Amino acid sequence: MKNTVIIQASSRSNGDSFKISEQLLKLKGIDFIDLNTLSINHYDYDYQNKNDDFNPLATKIADKYDNIIFITPIYWYTMSGLLKVFLDRFSDLIRIHKDTGRKFRGKNVGLISVNNSDAYLKNFSEPIDLSCQYLGMNFKKYLHVPVIDETISNKSIEELNQFYNLF
Ligand SMILES: Cc1cc2nc3c(=O)[nH]c(=O)nc-3n(C[C@H](O)[C@H](O)[C@H](O)COP(=O)(O)O)c2cc1C
C-alpha cells in the first residue's frame, strides 16, 4: 500500500471511527486526516467559503495520495454530515478549481462505516460509489466494522487487513 490517506469523518476525534483508524495506522505508509479538526463549510453557490480549509486540503490530497480511505460513522442511516459536506465541496473542484479536480481521476477509494451493531445497511456505499464514478475515481471496496463495547472483533481486524491489502 503506498501514498494512502485515511479521511476520518466522525464528530468526535477519538471515538469508534478512530479505533478503526488506529488499526490501519499501525500499517506502514498511511497518513491521517481528521475532518473534525478542520473548518470546511457547506457548499456555497457564491463561493463565499473560499478561504476555509477545503481547497488547501483538496490540493494536498490531489498532489500527494493515490489511495483515499473514508471512515465514517453511520449517522441516521447514512454517512456523517462531515463526510457529506466534504463530498458536496467537490463541486468546487468541478466548477472552479478544475485542475485540482482533474488530479482526482484514477485515484482509488475505499469506504469504511462504523456503528455499534452488525446491522447491515443496503446501499450505504452507493453515494460514494456513484460519486467516484462521476469523478473518474476507482471505488474499490466498502467494509462495515462494528465497534461493540469499544472493541473491534478479530473477524473485523482480519477484514481490515484484507481491505488494506487491496490498496
Ligand atoms: C447523530 C447520530 C446518529 C446515529 N445514527 C445511527 C444510525 O442511524 N444507525 C446506527 O446503527 N447507529 C447510529 N448512531 C450510532 C453511531 O453510528 C455509533 O455510535 C458509532 O460507532 C459512532 O462512531 P464515532 O464514535 O466515530 O462517532 C448514531 C450516532 C449519532 C451520534
Image (tube, rainbow, N blue to C red):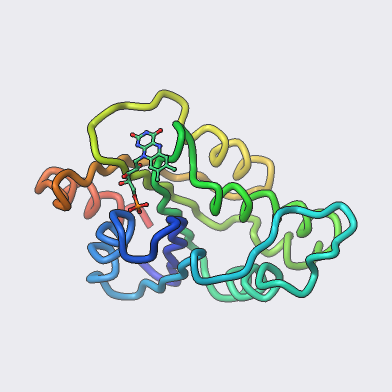
* Ligand 1: image quarter: top left
Question: Which residue is depicted at the point 55% across and 47% down?
Answer: 81
Q: Which is nearer the eye, 23 or 117?
A: 117
> Residue 121 at x, y = what percent?
38, 27
> Residue 104 at x, y = what percent?
64, 60
**Is 34 left or right of 160, judged from the image as shown?**
right
For residue 22, above or below residue 71 = below
**Total numbered badges shown on the rendered structure:** 0
Question: Which residue is depicted at the point 9% across and 48% down?
Answer: 154
> Residue 117 at x, y = what percent?
23, 34
Q: Which is nearer the eye, 36 or 1?
A: 36
Q: Which is nearer the eye, 57 or 129?
A: 57
Instruction: Report the residue that reaches farthest toward the left.
Output: 154
Question: Which residue is depicted at the point 55% across and 54% down?
Answer: 82
**Is 156 left or right of 114, judged from the image as shown?**
left
Question: Which residue is depicted at the point 45% across and 54% down?
Answer: 70
Instruction: Report the residue that reaches farthest toward the top.
Output: 122
